[in-house]
Amino acid sequence: MFPMSVLERYPDLSVDDVEKIQEAMNFFDEHIRGKNAKDVPIIKEKYGDGFQGQNSDYTKEKWPPKRTFYLLKRNLADGNGDSIIKYYPMKYTVNLALGITNWKSPFTSNALETKIKVTGIEWIHKEEDEDWLEDKDVDIWGEFSSKEKPTKTIATNKASSTQSDIDSLMKAILRRKLVILEGVPGTGKTHVFDSIKEEFDHATFLTFHPSSDYSTFVGGIRPGKNEVTKKLEFNPTKGHLLNILDKAKDGKVILWIDELNRANVPRVFGDLISLIGNKNPPELHIPNVGIEGAEQKIKLTQEQIGHLHIVGTMNTSDRSVTPLDAALRRRFNFIRLHPMTKSDLFAIESSNNEFAFKAIEEDITCFEDLNQLLNENMGSDAIMGHSYLFEMSKHAKEDSKRVLLWKYSILPNIIDTLLISQNFELIKEINNIIGKNTGLKLVDSAQNGFGKGLGRMILVAEVSE
């Protein structure tokens, strides 16, 4: 049915490959949906024993691990003309379509995700969408009418000031408890805290930095004044994490850590990382951190585990920060926040007259064109967040302030990205985008006889009449 091929190094999916994948979906619907693959004779007949192991047992009871579980998705019309949404395991479907029968091949789910993204095939990550999949009791061979589909909570991963999007993030934080909001600066990561903190019995806000350490976060020997003698003394003192764990005994708490990856996170968390993301955390002996009792041990109750929520924010475009280690990444759920689109901004204006986005529509178009250019040439971490546009909308009738925002905020951010990446060839394309709307341009010092050495700069100048 499908021609065999050997794929060893994650090749790009051609148009022909996409057609084969669509055909494999039809094959699934006809022969496998609602069954275990190992129980379908045609699988063994056509593909041998390659699909007969536990990896092919895709009933709801045998779902693969969350972090490697991607689903292909498509809409089909039923006999009544209604739309039906069906799901297919990504790796299984693509391997079947392209004739890969060795499940130990290097064609992994993560690699497949990057290839599927550039095709017209729809897909989801089960972990991102598990809320509505599981709430509807849908296994991966299941289906339901699109009319019944509830609003996605995380799939869009888009930061917004609208109440519905804040509610979606709140739902995700309550359900997953350990969440990291990541994205480029200006996408509203920190703003979320102000919108949700009242939902908790206690909220603590921290900002990590290179000097953040174990003694302030967990606990340690710290100076203080003796209340009786008024003299300086040093005592074991609890840090932010132990304090909020104490408060978790009495109610729902959230520890918000802004700029999480600006600190050396493994060193700051230390041994208490064992208590995070563990349904049955061990009892830990942690001396000299202010824990009461001679044994100085801490053991979390199920009530504390249920009440504790930790949210961190990460700036993905800052190359000076410390990368997170695998232990921390396993424990947290990552939600990426993207810049708002023009339609998102207009929707906000319709319900909040504080902003005037329609009056700066040309600036928004220019901003989106720049982001598209940066994304296509340098990746998603090079783009800019929408916070600039919120500020600009407040000065929609003041052209001088609008231009100053471009000159001293937006364009310097782009210049920094160009200098770090050495993408000087993009200057001409950027000038084509910004010139007419802003009256500004970028100037490469190398074009003015200053050479291309270490002192090479990019300057902002006004466009000559």
Image (cartoon, grey):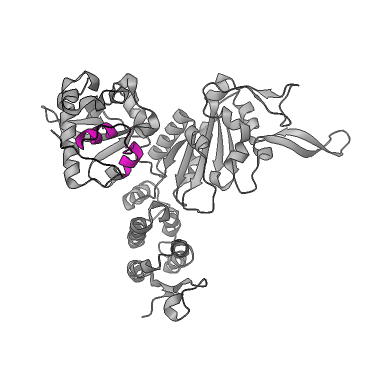
Vertically, is 453 above or below 2?
Answer: below
Q: Quadrant of residue 46?
A: top left
Q: In this orientation, does residue 462 appear?
A: yes
Q: Does 89 sit left or right of 332 as displayed? A: left
Q: In which quarter of the image is the N terminus?
A: top left
Q: How many marks?
A: 0
Q: Residue at x 26, y 35 (%)?
A: 72
Q: Does the magenta stretch include residue 58?
A: no
Q: Which of the pair 451/380 is nearer the observer?
A: 451
Q: In this orientation, does residue 384 appear?
A: no
Q: Which residue is drawn at 46% across and 41% down?
A: 181
Q: Where is residue 169 in the image (x, y as percent from the top left)?
A: 43, 36
| Magenta region | 90-114
Q: Which of the pair 108/35 is nearer the observer?
A: 108
Q: Where is residue 329 in the image (x, y as percent from the top left)?
A: 48, 37
Q: Does 146 sit left or right of 172 as displayed? A: left
Q: Is residue 95 magenta?
A: yes
Vertically, is 183 above or below 37?
Answer: below
Q: Which of the pair 27/117 is nearer the observer?
A: 27
